Image: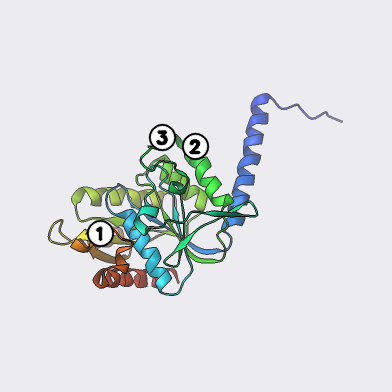
Amino acid sequence: MNTPRKLTPQEEARLHQVRKNFQERRQISDSLKSIKKKIGIYSGKGGVGKTTVATNMAVKIAEKGFSVSLFDCDIDCPNVTKTIKISDVPTEKNKKLIPPKIHGVQVMSMSFFQEDEETAIIWRGPMIHNAINQFLSSTEWGEVDFMLVDLPPGTSDAPLTVMQTLQLDGFVIVTTPQDLAALDAKRSINMIKKLNLDILGIVENMSGDFFGRGTGEDISSEMMIPFLGSIDLRKEYKNTNGPIIKESKIVNQEYSDIVDSLLKIVE
């Protein structure tokens, strides 16, 4: 009878990492199993209003009677809590974090755990990966119809980590009318396609006389993805008391139309 060969230290380390990764994936899967749909709100560049769109979409979906979670995965610059104007923080029960809720939306963000919101978070890829895994596995999400995930911008390590970890059901791409924003939107769409993930639609933000309009529809037609709607750049956005759909009827209607289009696709 042959004696099993003893593993080298390098092989032992690789085996340990495989076991650790498997355990993490199982913990995350167990944590998210009660969430029916997980949708990423994504853009190829910052500054297109991705967080504003994610926040207002989440609140609008909740207004339509669904249970909603909003997960801020932009680890470097977490802004969801400022946009939705939540002051409560997560509580703990049975060694699990319970997200606070506002406007019918439960919220989880890295910003809850920052002592100073102006401090830069300077992390390399593995630290971002570990932080996201920790958030997902240690949070008690409960029974949720929709989780909207505010992803980091770009096409590199941070958004890739989120996409591979969360197993999202689809993505909403946010662009603005400018040519450079459109180019970056196409890059983000191509990244998602390379990962064989679903694109649910595209939203054009900041439309109007100042930046122009129609870019979102052009991308939709060119890349054969649904166009969910456009959001005009309005003076109402100067109001920072909370989600703009709570302050403006006309903006509320814009988001209502976008969410209705999205719900038709995912349901």
Going by the picture, which residue comes out furthest to the bottom? 65
Q: What element carries label 2?
A: helix
Q: Name the residue under label 2.
A: 127
Q: Name the residue under label 1.
A: 205
Instruction: Identify the mark at residue 122; answer none if there is no mark.
Output: 3
Mark closer to the chain start, 1 or 2 = 2
Instruction: Give the quarter of the image for residue 6.
Output: top right
200 left or right of 27 in image: left
Residue type at the position of mark 2: Met
The residue positioned 64% from the left and 45% from the top of the image is 23
The front one of 219 and 250 is 250
Mark 2: few/some/many CA within 10 Å (<14, 14-19, 20+): few
Residue type at the position of mark 1: Asn
Q: What element carries label 1?
A: strand
- Give the colour scheme of this rendering: rainbow
- Horizontal and vertical percent for residue 189? 34, 52
Instruction: Give the quarter of the image for residue 262.
Output: bottom left
The residue positioned 51% from the left and 49% from the top of the image is 165
